[in-house]
Amino acid sequence: MDGTAMAEIPGAVAAQRRMAEDLFDALRRDGLDEPGVTRDPYGPGEQRAHVTVRRAAEALGLLIGRDAAANLYMTWPGADRAAPSVVIGSHLDSVPHGGNFDGAAGVVAGLVAIAALQRLGVRPACDVAVMGIRAEESVWFQVSYIGSRGALGTLPDGALSVRRIDTARTLAEHMRDCGGDPDALAKGARHFDPKRLRAYLELHIEQAPSLVEAGIPVGICTGIPGNFRHPCVTIEGETAHVGLPRRFRHDAAMAGADFAMAMDRLWEAHEARGVPMCFTIGRFHTDPAQHGLTIVPGTFQFSLDVRAYDPAVLAALEREVDAIVAAVQQRRGVRFDRGDKPGAAVGRVDPAIAAALTAQAASMGIATMPLGSPASHDAAAFAACGVPMGMIFVRNENGSHNPHEAMTTDDFLAGTAVMAGWLAEAVG
Ligand SMILES: [Zn+2]
């Protein structure tokens, strides 16, 4: 069955619209934390979202399950339950005071797509599980892909003992509160055998304005950037009197400024060569308790996130950062302590899935464009385990990680129709 058949079912689109709008309204109420929504991972905000989507899944007759990382599975059972299954996943947590669609849209899309196919009388050949993924937003635990890597058995060492920045409680404690079993994870338990997964599909709002700029509702993902991060870099210089001549100074703040500007020039050079990358310094500060108007700052702190779509580019960037640090240390007579360096692998999209999604959209008259993901997504954790992966982006104004995300229901339904069409073809 192709997309044209889906669009011809009278009332189907109206029913999907109502279901999507009701679910988004309920999720917004659950997470309301003016301005915006807060769905704190392994906390009350995320927990309420789990209850809401679970209820919607039960209404569709889906089977409900959980794993040791307390991820939620809402499974549409297939004719052959032992056959490799399809997972449609996204995260249900948010940043503090974020928007309603980042993450949640992918879970709602999975449920709405299944509802549409059920209405058409489709019986899937294999299981199709909609997965409500835990703790994707790394602002809380400063570890990426916690839920998805928990399910795949690839959580990094030490992750269970990291502390949530606002509660100072460990991931293991938070997980236990939500019905998870961190001890099982520590022993290597995993929910998925990647070889038993036929595909992983994720729909997400676009977090950059490329689709808005192009006037196109849906993007087909070409890749997810990998990253390396230094959550806390400290520069040690020498604290001194404000009158100290320049030649005697070891100014840690100026060393930070040198580093930031060198990184910006590096990005500019990559851009000129057409090589996609980006870096962000989210924190950049002296300690106001120690430093002030008349003190040359002897210490300085910042965070660094560097991302690229090609593992070779990412590796080269790590070497460039080493070189910049060495040069700034030499020039300013300071020392960089870069601390931990968590990272995430580049997420390669399965070319056959991307081509099939593009063809589905074309058959429904939905305009799409190929799009490199500007952000990290759980899909990358599946791709890293060799699971064939695809992503659908939906046009969204005003970016994300803020309360002003703006995705129209029309665009959401267009992206969801592409997902449903792909599912019908793949498992129908
Ligand atoms: Zn997200």
Image (cartoon, rainbow, N blue to C red):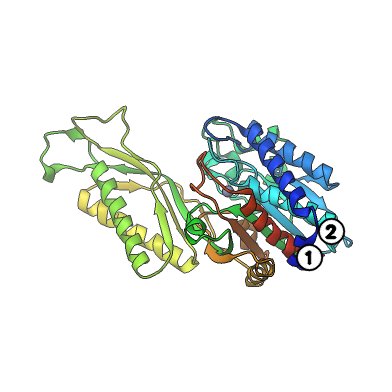
In the rendering, at what x and y percent does residue 187 appear?
Answer: 70, 47
- Establish whether ligand 1 lies closer than 8 Å to the Cβ of label 1: no
In the picture, measured across the screen, residue 125 lies left or right of residue 396, that is right
Foreground pick, 29 / 391: 29
Quadrant of the rendered image containing residue 283: top left
x 56%, y 41%: residue: 99
Q: Is label 2 or label 1 in front?
A: 1
Q: Is residue 411 visible?
A: yes
Picture disc at residue 5: 1
Disc 2, SS = loop
Above/below status of 317 relative to 52: below
Quadrant of the rendered image containing residue 94: top right
In the rendering, at what x and y percent does residue 251 appear?
Answer: 22, 42
| Label 2 to label 1: alpha-carbon separation | 9 Å
Q: Quadrant of the C terminus?
A: bottom right
In the picture, measured across the screen, residue 336 lies left or right of residue 80, that is left
Above/below status of 315 relative to 50: below
In the picture, measured across the screen, residue 255 lies left or right of residue 423, that is left
In the rendering, at what x and y percent does residue 174 appear?
Answer: 64, 34
Whether tag 2 and tag 1 are in contact, CB under 8 A, the answer is: yes
Q: Most extreme residue toward the top, as rendered?
A: 289
Q: Residues within 10 Å of mark 2 (few under 14, many from 20)?
A: some
Above/below status of 36 relative to 401: above
In the rendering, at what x and y percent does residue 199 appear?
Answer: 71, 63
- Identify the residue position indicated by label 2 in the image: 120
In the picture, measured across the screen, residue 83 lies left or right of residue 388, that is right
Q: Most extreme residue toward the front, as rendered?
A: 10
Task: Name which residue type carries label 2.
Answer: Leu
Q: Quadrant of the N terminus?
A: bottom right
Q: Is residue 175 visible?
A: no
Task: Name which residue type carries label 1.
Answer: Ala
x 65%, y 59%: residue: 382
